Amino acid sequence: MIRIRKLEDVTDWRMCVGCGACAYICPENRVRLVDFPDEGIRPTIADGACGSCRLCVDACPAVNSDFRVAGLGHRAGSSPSFTKEWGPIGAIWDGHAADPGVRFQGSSGGALTAIGAYCLEVLGMHGVLHTAQDPADPIRNRTRLSRTKAELIAATGSRYSPASVCNGLGLVEDAPAPCVIIGKPSEIAAVRNACKMMPNLDRKVGVTLSFFCAESPSTSGTVALLRTLNVDPLSLDDLRYRGRGWPGYFAPRRKGESEPCRSMSYRESWAFLQAYRPWSVQLWPDGTGESADISCGDPWYQEPDGKNPGSSLVVARTERGREIVEGAMAAGYLELSPAEDWKLVDSQSGLLAKKGAVWGRRLALRLLGLPVMQVDGLQLWHCWKRLPLKDKFRSTIGTVRRVLIRRLYRPMKLNAANGVLVKPAVVGAAPGRQ
């Protein structure tokens, strides 16, 4: 079995999920994040040399992730199987942001934006660390620490392209008061790792929010989709993947224009983009933010009718998360009603199937002598056992075939010259085009 000993091993063996924690935690500031068009955001080592501390490897969620957080555990009335499949859950609600504007602009009801605004305006948290469109390069993202509700609203809408929210953890650590962190499930797992290693950061993380997510496609997916619509990526002034109704539209807007030049439904655009997810994404097991305090996502148990401005399933996974959701409801930031377990099951069956398939993929990689992440507390074996026989076969034998055909048994060497350097995180709205 190949062992991961240094940061280059994580990228070479296609394990990196691009969270950016390594860049934050490096004491010598040697890690640079680069967006490789076909792979996503990956770390490179400045000057080609590194010390011997291994902090970056220890923080990496693709090397080790412990999901045995101090969650609420078994939900009253839920079956033990439900808890194994969906992680710690204390309560589930169905609803949306109370502010109609936030609800409409958000990808699925604006719940995360509303919770972030509540934490800023009522709880007095310093800021919200999250991903937003880079105004100077709309096909890419930039980590931002928003200080106001207006800044949050300006950044609403999912971003189906590489992001690395953890490269902004330094802003959280240096903040005068606790902050909110919104990230993909893999990024929140990285935050948990970093907090264990950095006590000052741990004290400044007020709450972690995540969202149901199959992880991000590479930038080449966005570029290819734009070209199918005959839109030059360099001509853009704005690019929305979702939002402005549920589930929203992929809508690019050219410079100098006030309206999108093209429009494609969410289902069509995601069906196209998901084919561009890198190999590491197929190995990441958590799609519902099991290590977050609160996770939110689309209520796909109901079909969009073109009239619904948006709704979310909101899941409290820790006592802190439940307190904040209930506080946001009482303060008028959220309009929620209790939701039954079946709504989560029917809404996110694809993410549960992937969680089970990851166990089979990991088995195949082990048999081939390839490295896999150390993961605790996710009940992957239980989820794999519940898969249909054909899916079990696909997750194991299919993975072996993919590794051999695509030669994934060979290390991948990335050249930073072939990518775009990721910009540092900023406070407030990112500057526009220079």
Image (cartoon, rainbow, N blue to C red):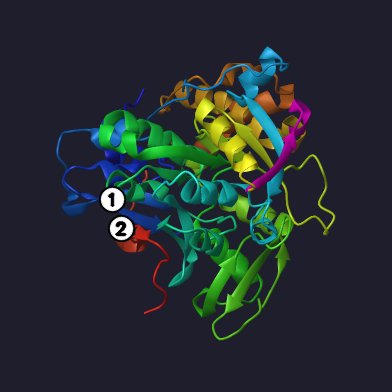
- The part of the chain drawn in magenta is 333-343
Lateral position of residue 348 relative to residue 425, left or right: right
Name the kind of residue labelled 1 in the image: Thr
Find numbered disc 2 in the image and state the secondary structure of the residue it sits on: helix
Q: Image quadrant for the C terminus?
A: bottom left
Judging depth in this view, the residue of 247 and 97 nearest the camera is: 97
Does the magenta portion include 342?
A: yes
Residue 276, given in percent of the width and then of the height, sits at 56, 52
Judging depth in this view, the residue of 319 and 181 nearest the camera is: 319
Name the kind of residue labelled 2 in the image: Ala
- At x 66%, y 24%, the residue is 392
Lateral position of residue 162 relative to residue 273, left or right: left
Residue 431 falls in image quadrant: bottom left
Badge 2 or badge 1: first in the primary sequence: 1
Does the rendering let one see residue 53? yes
Q: Which residue is mark 1?
A: 44
Judging depth in this view, the residue of 72 and 197 nearest the camera is: 72
Up-down relation of residue 152 to residue 59 (above or below): below
Find numbered disc 1 in the image and state the secondary structure of the residue it sits on: strand
Up-down relation of residue 246 to residue 209 (above or below): below
- At x 69%, y 53%, the residue is 271
